Image: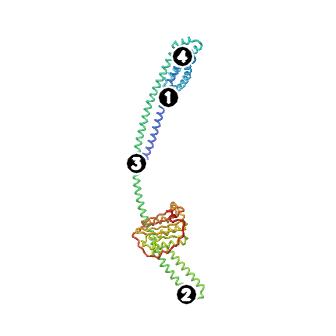
Amino acid sequence: MDAWLTRWRRELALGGCLVVAAGILVVSELGHRSITHRYQSAMQSIATSVRLNTLSARLADAETGQRSFLLTAKREYLEPYEDAVPQIRKLLDELRPHYALHPDADAEKVYATLIAAIGAKLGEIDLTLDLTEHARIDRALEIVQSGVGQRTMDEIRFLLEDLSRREDNSARTIAEGWHASLALSRLGIALVAALNVVLVVALFFGLKRDWRVSNERQDLLNRHVRERTRQLDSLASRLQEAAEAERSALARELHDELGALLTASKMDIAWIRGRLGEEHAALHQKLARVIQHLDQGMVAKRRIVEGLRPSTLSTFGLATAARELTEQVAERAGWDVELELPEIDPQLPEEVEIALFRVLQESLTNATKYAQATRVRVRLGCEPLHCRLEVEDNGRGFRAGEMRSGAQGLFGMRQRTEARGGSLHVLSAPGSGTLIRALLPVQSPPCWRSSRPRESVPVAPAPGDAHGIAGA
């Protein structure tokens, strides 16, 4: 129940953070759109004010051109008028959509009145210019002096000022609204961000507590795993010791019991064969074959006994047993072998001798089955505190990843050495051979016992040093 509540609170806090983050985006986007709209409206009002001022200036230019032409009757003085009229019409066209959609209905009416007044003013100017061109300048001056054009121009200025004032007021209102929207947007973002910070802090402390609980559980699990591993290692060591004891017992039984039976059987058959006459030639042949079979059985018995528990290991010691085993395997496999063994067998604890011998045995078996080697080097060195065994070949090697499948022998060697406080290192690479190094501690300094003299072992020259072969 507590775990469910904790998970529910954590998910609620995480969901709240996501909702708040989405709220920040929504508030920011809405504020941005509002500010953008108000900004565009303000810019449009400013642009309208500029057009109104430009329109006033162009009307003044048109009136100036009219007065200059009436006074001089020269066509070049009409240029201001001719330039201003197209611009006036263009400005009116640009302003028309703005006031057609203007929210202030009075502004639209004022603009309509302005268009009519500008039309009247341009008509009055066109009339006076036409009269002047037809040599009726007196009539044109009468129209100008009547004051109609002046009153129309005053009305136009009043209407332009009215529209400019309305645009200024609109821009001011928009600016005030823009500042209000900006302040509201900032306030909303600040509130939402503060809420998000609160939720993030709550989520952080919740995750921190969960992390602490998870670490405590992981530590407890690791302690259980280490304890179980220690128990399994202890059990594996006992099983290995029991297996070695069973091997020794079985080897003794085979040597003592089966060996005695085979020897007695051979002696009895030899006695019977000696009592038979020459007339029993077929029986002599049968008994000879039986004796031959008994000899083969004794050889097989001796090979089995040596495989279970080498007699040289218990009789002479590790160095002699390692030399004999290596030479036998090398002879069967056709290897060139190089031995670096102590001249005198060290007197080691029995479990150390057995462990190192089994590592050597398994290493040579692997080299025979998988390495495709032509040269093998075996080194054994014992110092006051530890013994080191190295088996090196120039075979095809392997990748470290290949040990995960079909490498029970290597795992067994590692477990055997580590269970006795030692270590096993395997150095190999494809095409570079393999080096297996086992290091076992010695509980007490080794003594040295005599052994048979070390025989010279022929070593054929090999391409490259053994260290290079192992890729070490």
Q: Which is more toward the observer, 208 or 147? A: 147
Disc nearest the viewer among 1 and 4: 4
Q: Which residue is mark 3?
A: 206
Q: Secondary structure at mark 1?
A: helix
Disc nearest the viewer among 1 and 2: 1
Give the CA separation, mark 2 to mark 4: 167 Å
In percent of width and height, residue 208 lies at 40, 49
Sequence-wise first label, 1 or 2: 1
Q: Which residue is mark 1?
A: 44
Q: Which residue is mark 4?
A: 68
Instruction: Name the amino acid, label 3.
Output: Gly
Q: Secondary structure at mark 4?
A: helix
Give the CA separation, mark 1 to mark 4: 36 Å
Disc nearest the viewer among 3 and 2: 2
Count of numbered tags: 4
Q: Which residue is mark 2?
A: 274
Sequence-wise first label, 1 or 4: 1
Circle 1/circle 4 CB separation < 8 Å = no
Disc nearest the viewer among 4 and 3: 4
Q: Which is more toward the observer, 404 or 364? A: 364
Instruction: Name the amino acid, label 2.
Output: Gly
Relative height, residue 367 to residue 34 (above, below)? below
Give the CA separation, mark 1 to mark 2: 137 Å
Task: Tell me which residue sits at (53%, 76%) in the image.
Answer: 300
In percent of width and height, residue 137 lies at 56, 12
Give the CA separation, mark 3 to mark 2: 97 Å
- Residue 84, by quadrant, is top right
